Amino acid sequence: MTQFKWSSTGIDVVNAFPRSVNHKTIVITGASQGGIGAETALSLAHGNPKHILLAGRSEDKVKPVIEEINKINPGITVTFIQIDLGSQASVRRAAAAINNATTSQIDILINNAAIMACPYAKTEDGIESQFGTNYIGHFLLTNLLIGKMQSAGGGARIVNLTSTGSAAGEVNFDDINFDDGKTYNPIAGYAQSKIAIILFTVSLSKKFDSKQIASFSVHPGSITTGLQKHFQDPVVFKEIVEYVEAKIGGKFQLEEIKTLQQGCSTTLVAALDPSITASSGLYLADADIAKEQPKPAAMDPDTAEKLWALSEKLVGQKFVW
């Protein structure tokens, strides 16, 4: 149990753990202005990290975040890394750029970027877009950066953002592409990608001693950002409600809205709090280890390894740690 709660802010967490931030090298995906990733980076700037690398599709959307970080703490080196998580070629280029830009090690990797409930599409690699972007892109990026994380010499963290939407999800190992879109539901695709992220976290926790690299999945809460743009379509929203209610066997309820500062606090607890190191592999919500962990299917080590093997096949590379 941590010292934080639903209303805690990202800056609260950063101020509580100055040693966990001081002189650290931190990579964050999805850091466009106005999102949780950007707010996470701005909170970290209130500490004294050595280097923050912000990975995103558009430099124009990340540039204002870099400028704000420089205002908060001009001593921090901030680097933009171009990445399209839906393109494995782009992920590989980004990983190479990150590895080249970090002279010695990566201390914290925050896999924050996501798309949500979007119309059916495939990535350039032929994978349903939400699974390919939210999960496979991060699976590949993380594994390509592991070497630099091992160079940290212990205490590195991987934080994977998921969602309560994972409760309505399952990985369809025989058909991750929803019969080429014929059986696709926007929230089913999102839920599949988010339960995959939890299973990925479980795999990482089994492969690494928590004192070397600890991994956590986090639900940031309900925050109003550009991520929810497809919810504004009443047809899509109706599909979402019907799908979730059918899966969970209860009434769909929206969570109480958090501010961006409250929304990034759980990510930062997972990234910085030394008291939770031994809990590697678990799921956090409301700035604490969640009392109610995800359903057993989302935490099963055998299923996690099955997903790891599928993921290696999809990226065409094996990762043995």
Image (tube, grey):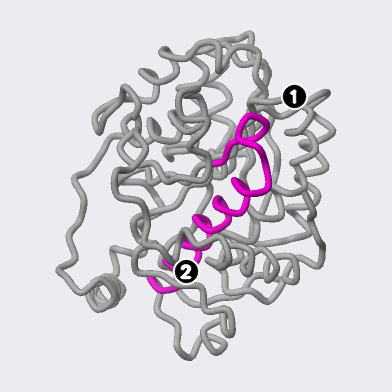
Q: Nearer the viewer, residue 294 or 41?
A: 294
Q: In the rendered view, does 135 fall on the left or right side of 184? A: right
Residue 204 spot, x, y in % from top left: 63, 48
- Which residue is at 51% across, 73% downward? 171
Callout 1 secondary element: loop
Mark on residue 306? none
Of residues 116 and 233, the one drawn nearer to the viewer in this rendering: 116
Q: Is residue 28 visible?
A: no
Q: Determine crowd level at label 2: few under 14, some 14-19, many 20+ residues with C-alpha closer than 10 A.
A: many
User: Does residue 100 appear to the left or right of 3 in the view shown?
Assistant: right
**One can see residue 237 in this view:** yes
Residue drawn at the location 41% of the way across and 67% of the way down: 117
- Span of residues in magenta: 187-215
Eyeballing the image, is 139 above or below 145?
below
Give left or right: position of 315 versus 249.
right
Query: Where residue 45 sits: x, y (%)?
Result: 52, 17
In reply to whether residue 52 is colored magenta, the answer given is no
From the viewer's perspective, is the residue at label 2 or at label 1 nearer? 1
Left or right relative to 1: residue 269: right
Instruction: Provide the secondary structure element on which disc 2 rests.
Output: helix
- At x 45% / y 45%, what residue is drawn? 282
Q: Amino acid at mark 2?
A: Gln
- Residue 163 coordinates in the image, percent (x, y): 39, 54
The residue where tag 2 is placed is: 192
Q: Amino acid at mark 1?
A: Gly
Question: Which residue in the protein does label 1 denote?
Answer: 153
Residue visible at 48% across and 37% down in the picture: 279
Foreground pick, 100 / 173: 173
**Quadrant holding the N terminus:** top left
Find residue 180 and report its horizontal and vertical position in percent.
57, 87
